[in-house]
Amino acid sequence: MDFWVLGQYAVNILFLAGIYGCVGLGFSLVYGVMNIINLAHGSLIMMGAYTTFWLFTSYGIDPFLSIPLSAVLFFMIGYFIQGAIINRVMKTGIFMIMILTYGIEIILVNLALYLWKANYRSVAPAYSGNILELGSITIPYLKLAILAATVLITVCVYLFINKTKTGMAIQATSLNRYSAQLVGIDIHRIYNITYGVSTALAATAGALIASVYPIFPSMEGPFLGKAFVIAVLGGLGNMAGALVGGLGLAVAETVGSLVFGASYQNVTAFAVFVIILVLRPYGLVGKRFFAEISS
Amino acid sequence: MRNNLAAVGIWVAVLFLVLTTLPLILSGYWLKILTNIIMFAVLAQSCNIISGYTGYPALGNVVFFGLGAYSTAILMNRIGAPFPLALLAAGLISGLYAAVLGLPILKTKGHYFVMATLGVNEATRELVNNLDFLTGGGIGMSLPIPDRSIQSFYILIYFTMLVILVSCTLLVHFVSRSPFGFALRAIRANEQAAGVMGINTTLCKTGAWVASAFFTGLAGGVYAYWLTYIESQVVFSIIIGVKFFVILLLGGAGTVFGPLLGAFMFQIIDQFIWGAFPEFHLGVLGLLMIMVVIFVPNGLLRLFETRIWFPAKGLFQALGVMGTRAGRSEKG
Amino acid sequence: MALLQVKDVTVGFGGVKALNGLSFEVNQGEIFGVIGPNGAGKTTLLNVVSGIIRPSAGEILYRGRLVSGLPTHTITRLGVGRVFQITQPFHGLTVRENVLVGAYFGTRKSSTSTVDVDAILELVGMDKLASRPVSELSVAMRKRLEFARALALRPDLLLLDEVMAGLAPTEVDYLTGIVKRINREGITIVMVEHVMRAVMATCRRVLVMHLGKHLAVDAPEAVTRDNRVIEVYLGRRYAERMAGTAGEKRG
Ligand SMILES: Nc1ncnc2c1ncn2[C@@H]1O[C@H](COP(=O)(O)OP(=O)(O)OP(=O)(O)O)[C@@H](O)[C@H]1O
Ligand SMILES: [Mg+2]
């Protein structure tokens, strides 16, 4: 394979990795802090995509400019969902919480079906046809912008988690919720904020997806699936790992479709996923967690 | 205790009588609903073996439903196998799939297990989509139309489903009071300790999953024949998977009759929702799931047993005795 | 021949070597103590012997038979019982049922005599609690339950992981009594313990571990006077000072 073809693949993978990183970030955050597999994540992404679509078609707001708007809106929605519903059942087992989040998932799908119907929709900003050419590699400016956006978002999340007081409290809660309470952290508020941030990240991912792909209500399923794979590749609950996982999934899909044919890209992704779960449940890069026997 | 057992006997007999005579007098519409209830009871009961008794939340168990449906369809359509044979093979294929997958996947626990089962479901669905020459790919697949009157066909389907439910429930009943069931409960409570107490945890877990997969596969096979047309999006859909999980929780996980009660209640409510809010069916279903989790986390069976006065309290108490305390009367 | 032989066993967790080429032997019929500071690898050692963890190197022989690599339940059925440091009861089962599990599944096929669960409960003083759910038990009672469960396996070798930790002195003496009694009835015991009161009272030989390695095997009195051991527990400076004062007294 010659250099330019490889280059083109690398660029495509990088772009996919950006979107996937964004998809996985919020999912992993919630798992890391609250130990919840958030089955509503896919539909939150989908709703984020539709919000972008709505802002674009009704008010002509550029998809990238819509990100801050929808992020704030979705933060509040997430804060509310956690505070009003999920916090009630935090002490029950994993069965319960999963069913609960799935309930939220299908409510949102129903809402989207009602508001926008099952049709494919797309957002096409005026510049979406513009292309940067590097030798024989072609890069749409849109994809460059998405890559830039994901880098920016990652930096913001990094700063938020590591440099703010709330971020520290989130980290403390994720390490040990009981000790966090002992040092005066209101863990329920932290849960609300965490879910809010995760929801805002889902909305952001949705906005990025909407700017390049067609959107439809049942896209939640595939993206929830992708969030799983990304999070597990990077190590469940590990935020930096989510970015690695995003890259991992992008590579797996691309290689999978090259080797087995395009229609096999999902099979490859899920096969890798199950294998990782069984062989390296702590992720590709993660350290083995402390599996101390506890009752 | 003896009183309760007698009560259970009577109630079970009445239930059986009702279930065997009803289909003969019901209209097509209601027969369909009843068959659906029985099917979901089978699915929830199968799930009960691995999730309720063994404690492994197999949210992706729907993969065996899809596998059973496709196996039946392929065997009948491509090879021309008669339905009973195809169905049995479908159950066995599903069980085998669980045995092969179980060895690695049952090593994972909790969230990891849930995700692994969901991943297996997705991977299998994708695979089915890609094997066009066998499965028809994304277009779906039709089964041979039965050459008998529609009414008698639906009655046949109903009774097949009922036989599966009865065998599955009997199995759960006997397992729950056998040493094997005791081992499963020990695994659910504390797997590591169970191993140290001499329980072959790998064997027990895999056995439980195989049984669960077998019955789920049978239900999938009957479903395929019933609808005479299947699509991977439907038979591998997570919604079905979550639905029978909710039914299990609603009725009471780890009880013998919980799944039956849950299926009945849930499907009736579901039917009502379809009628009343066709456009918001999914949304109301979601709401219902949330409410089940918040208000009846331990299942109806235990709720009736402990808190709520109910005209048939005796029944629920009796059923509860068989369910929650089955296996406690083990002799040393 | 020794009942249990541990030969050059190494267990690594990522970078940490929890056991590092550890070797020792336990004889039939003895009470063998294992001590060492926190993180020395004592629990890991018991995990390897009972088959919960596989060693990355080395081998373990039980009655001369290679057992490392066998699944946990097989090792149990060969006659190795195990009591956990962090109690691990079967929640949702009653006290009696907890013990029953062991009697059902843990005993060897060859042993014809049935296990008398009630006698075991009586032995550990829990006969009155038999039908209680385990969630109602106090810490001390949970430890006794752990004990009873392991006894129901009719083990020949019993591995005890800090059963005395966190218990009141009277409770320690009670359990010590039981340990001695079952030992007299023929059960060999490996006892990981921090409570020296119990170690002194029961063990003839003690293995001292440090950072996954064998430091010394000796009688408990000798071990407590061993400078290397004092150093490991209390630090070099303290050990030197002790050695110094001892020297002064002698001089
Ligand atoms: N599952 C695990 N993963 C990673 N490291 C582990 C694991 N289990 C134990 N360790 C490490 O191995 C070392 C030995 O641990 P172990 O629990 O065996 O010590 P111990 O002697 O029983 O200590 P204590 O007296 O505190 O019970 C420790 O450094 C510990 O951090
Ligand atoms: Mg220890």
Image (cartoon, coloured by chain):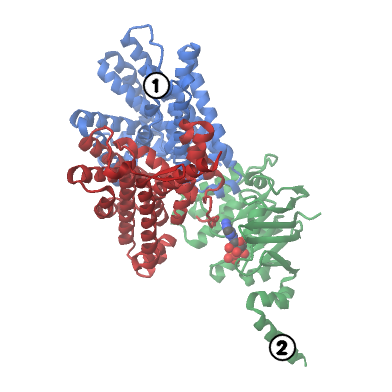
Residue visible at 49% across and 16% down in the picture? B75
Q: Look at mark 1 in the image and give the residue it sits on.
A: B140
Ligand 1 shows up in which quadrant of the image?
A: bottom right
Q: Residues within 10 Å of mark 2 (few under 14, many from 20)?
A: few
Can you tell which chain is drawn green? Answer: C
Q: Look at mark 2 in the image and give the residue it sits on.
A: C244
Q: x, y (%) of residue B74? A: 47, 18
Q: x, y (%) of residue C41? A: 64, 62
Say above or below: B51 vs A169: above
Q: x, y (%) of residue B289? A: 30, 40
Taking C63 as reference, is B23 left or right? left
Q: What chain letter is assigned to the residue under label 2?
A: C
SS type, badge 1:
loop
Q: Please identify the quadrant where the N terminus of chain A is shown.
A: top right
Identify the amino acid type marked 1.
Gly
Q: Residues within 10 Å of mark 1 (few under 14, many from 20)?
A: some
Q: What chain letter is assigned to the residue under label 1?
A: B
**Residue C159 makes an appearance in the image:** no
3D distance between C-alphas at marks 1 and 2? 87 Å
Q: Nearer the viewer, residue B329 or A209?
A: A209
Identify the amino acid type marked 2.
Gly
Please identify which colour was used for chain A in the image.
Answer: red
Q: Nearer the viewer, residue B80 or B173?
A: B80
Say above or below: B130 vs B146: below
**Residue C213 makes an appearance in the image:** yes
- Does mark 2 fall on the same chain as mark 1? no
Whether the residues at callouts 1 and 2 have beta carbons within 8 Å, the answer is no
Please identify which colour was used for chain B in the image.
Answer: blue
Taking A120 as reference, is A94 left or right? right
